[in-house]
């Protein structure tokens, strides 16, 4: 019986510790995820303001260059986890945010530092070219 109680206490303490270490703040994980975060008009501002360095991929389902860039963004999110948070915003489903930033061509990547846009990359450019630009801000 005592072993059961001890095990329950251990499990509860472990769960509390895991919750503390997960770093959840404002609905977003403060430690940068290794996958791009799906963004919407509703969560965009919170995402940008809660990440020191973020890259947002403005894209659309029908856009062939966007589909070519998608695996590169996924790789970069994994490689830069802990340094840069990546998000993806579908411009067809979220026109308000796309208009706010004057997105006229897709794919467009916007780099945000401390909530402010600091760089923009337009088109399906090679991974190395994106890395060179991102490394300026790390």
Image: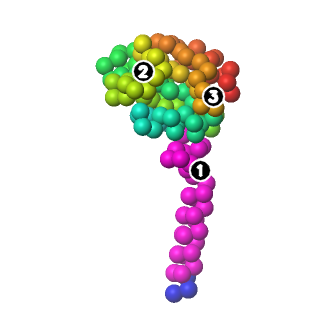
Residue 58 in view of the camera: no
Q: Secondary structure at mark 2?
A: helix
Quarter in which the C terminus is drawn? top right
Q: Secondary structure at mark 3?
A: strand
Tag 3 residue: 113
Q: How far apart are the alpha carbons under marks 2 and 1?
A: 32 Å
Question: Residue furthest toward the bottom?
Answer: 1
Residues under numbered marks 2 and 1 in contact, where contact means CB atoms less than 8 Å apart: no
Residues under numbered marks 2 and 3 in contact, where contact means CB atoms less than 8 Å apart: no
Q: Which residues are magenta?
A: 4-33
Report x, y in % for residue 8. 53, 75
Q: Quadrant of residue 32?
A: top right
> Which of the two discs, 1 and 3, sits closer to the camera?
3
> Which of the two discs, 2 and 3, sits closer to the camera?
2
Q: Which mark is residue 132?
A: none
Tag 1 residue: 23
Residue 5 is a magenta residue:
yes
Q: Secondary structure at mark 1?
A: loop
* Of callouts 2 and 1, the N-terminal one: 1
Q: How far apart are the alpha carbons under marks 2 and 3?
A: 20 Å
Tag 2 residue: 99
Report x, y in % for residue 46. 52, 39
Q: How far apart are the alpha carbons under marks 1 and 3?
A: 20 Å
Q: Is residue 53 above or below residue 124?
A: below
Which residue is nearer to you in this view: 135 or 127?
A: 135
Which residue is nearer to you in this view: 15 or 4?
A: 15
Report x, y in % for residue 29. 54, 45
* Of callouts 2 and 3, the N-terminal one: 2
Q: Residues within 10 Å of mark 2 (few under 14, many from 20)?
A: few
Q: Residue at x 52, y 44 (%)?
A: 28
């Amino acid at each position: 019986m005592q072993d059961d109680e001890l095990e329950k206490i251990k499990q509860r303490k472990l769960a509390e510790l895991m919750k503390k270490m997960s770093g959840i703040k404002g609905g977003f994980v403060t430690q940068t995820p290794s996958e791009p975060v799906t963004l919407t008009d509703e969560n965009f501002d919170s995402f940008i303001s809660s990440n020191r360095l973020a890259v947002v991929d403005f894209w659309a389902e029908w856009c062939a260059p966007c589909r070519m860039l998608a695996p590169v963004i996924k790789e970069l999110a994994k490689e830069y986890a802990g340094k840069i948070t990546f998000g993806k915003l579908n411009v067809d489903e979220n026109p308000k945010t796309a208009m706010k930033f004057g997105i006229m061509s897709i794919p467009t990547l916007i780099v945000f530092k401390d909530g402010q846009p600091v760089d923009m990359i337009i088109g399906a450019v090679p991974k190395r070219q994106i890395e060179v630009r991102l490394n300026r801000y790390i």
